[in-house]
Image (cartoon, rainbow, N blue to C red):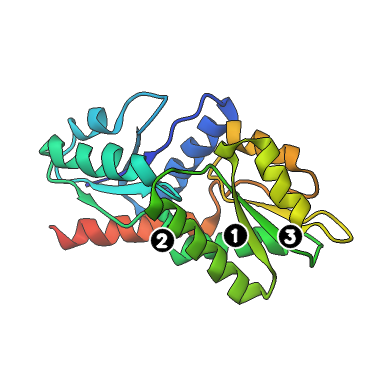
Amino acid sequence: MSIVLAAHGTRSKAGQETIAQVVSQVARVSGDDVHVGWVDVLEPTLGDVLADLEAPVVVPWLVGGGYHLSVDVYQVVERSGSGAVVTEPLGESPALISALLDRLAGVDDAGPVVLAWAGSSVTEARRRVARIAARLAAVTGRPIESVALAAGVERAQEVVAALTTERPPVVLSLLLAPGFFHDRAKKLGGVITDPIGAHPAVVDWAAGVGAAQLRSVV
């Protein structure tokens, strides 16, 4: 029985190592075979991985998702004929909120928060990130503004400047691994949190939803 993490690729070696760590940890927790199928940049692609598996569970390791979720995951799974089942994306999980709150708790600052994510032209992806920001604001009681890094550093810096009072806001990284966008987020100034990486909450979530789906089809 297999779980496949459908993850966005990165040319960053640190980013690749982070995803490899996630795969290893999910396998350890779930006790199942765990693979990664890349939806961009790297190989093997999700389609390549599914070609060698029978009825796996695909866990979209994506936050906003957008085009990658609708086309590079759902459509690829449908065309694969593998009998794969797709879970909800990581971006809809309570585990992601827990991981973000944990990252934020590690920053000694009670000011406003900029939630830095990659960005997407897909409406549902932007809505998903808006829901994440709203949940975080409700729990913390702090103003939280999301910023799409794909729009460029200057636009993101405008958002940061608008929220700056006595000190720059905390930049809360809504990124899953080091790489291009996390490097861009570092340029916003102030304190930035680490990417989500192999945070125990998201590892346990992936192992749990994957294993539950696998058990339901046997």
Q: CA distance from mark 2 to mark 3?
A: 23 Å
- The residue to which callout 1 is attached is 100
Q: Quadrant of the C terminus?
A: bottom left
- The residue to which callout 3 is attached is 106
Q: Closest to the observer: 213 or 115? A: 115
Q: Closest to the observer: 53 or 159? A: 159
| Element at label 2 | helix
| Element at label 3 | loop
Residue 120 percent across, percent down from the top left: 45, 43
Judge whether 33 appears above or below 99 on screen: above
Q: Earlier in the sequence, mark 2 or mark 3?
A: 2
Q: Quadrant of residue 14?
A: top right
| Element at label 1 | helix
What residue type is disc 1 on? Leu
Residue appearing at x 28%, y 33% in the figure: 46
What residue type is disc 3 on? Gly
Judge whether 101 appears above or below 192 on screen: below
Residue appearing at x 59%, y 75% in the figure: 138
Eye-nearest disc, 2 or 3: 2
Q: Earlier in the sequence, mark 3 or mark 1?
A: 1
- The residue to which callout 2 is attached is 92
Q: Is residue 179 visible?
A: no
